[in-house]
Amino acid sequence: MNTIDINNKRMSYTDIGEGRVLLFGRPSYLEQLERIDAPTLVIVGEHDRPRPVPEARQMSEIISGAGLEVIEDAGHISAKEQPGRVNKVLSDFLSQRGRVGP
């Protein structure tokens, strides 16, 4: 994830090619992810532009023990674009932790 300071606020942005960037109007919390102390699965659509796969991979590397799942043929709203796949990924993740029945 790329960050930049604007008006004393750290904002995140994504390079979308051709010399353009997409700036998010919310601060970056990347540096706080290492504080997560719970089973975590980072899910990202393979075509997600606002939060692309490399950023999701970075998040999963910062969070101790986190997994990463890339949802094929999906963008930023993968749960809507590929609901069956996302539900299976979540169900498997929770089942491995004894949180869901068989």
Image: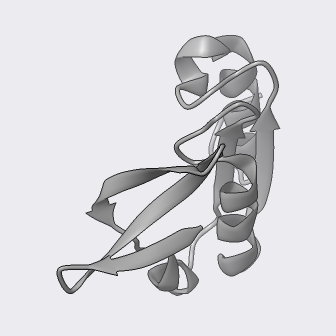
The answer to whether 3 is drawn above or below residue 93 in the figure is: below
Comparing 55 with 98, the one in front is 55
- Residue 66: x and y in percent read 73, 66
Comparing 41 with 13, the one in front is 13
Look at the image and tell me in which quarter the N terminus lies: bottom right
Let me know if residue 96 appears in the view.
no
Occupied quadrant, residue 23: bottom left
In the displayed structure image, the side of residue 34 where residue 24 appears, left or right: left
The answer to whether 64 is drawn above or below residue 72 in the figure is: below
The answer to whether 15 is drawn above or below residue 80 in the figure is: below
Let me know if residue 58 appears in the view.
yes
- Residue 37: x and y in percent read 56, 80
Determine the residue positioned at 77% across, 28% down.
Answer: 102
Determine the residue positioned at 57% across, 23% down.
Answer: 79
The answer to whether 69 is drawn above or below residue 60 in the figure is: above
Comparing 1 with 87, the one in front is 1
Q: Which color scheme did the rendering employ for the protein?
A: one colour
Determine the residue positioned at 41% across, 77% down.
Answer: 4
Occupied quadrant, residue 97: bottom right
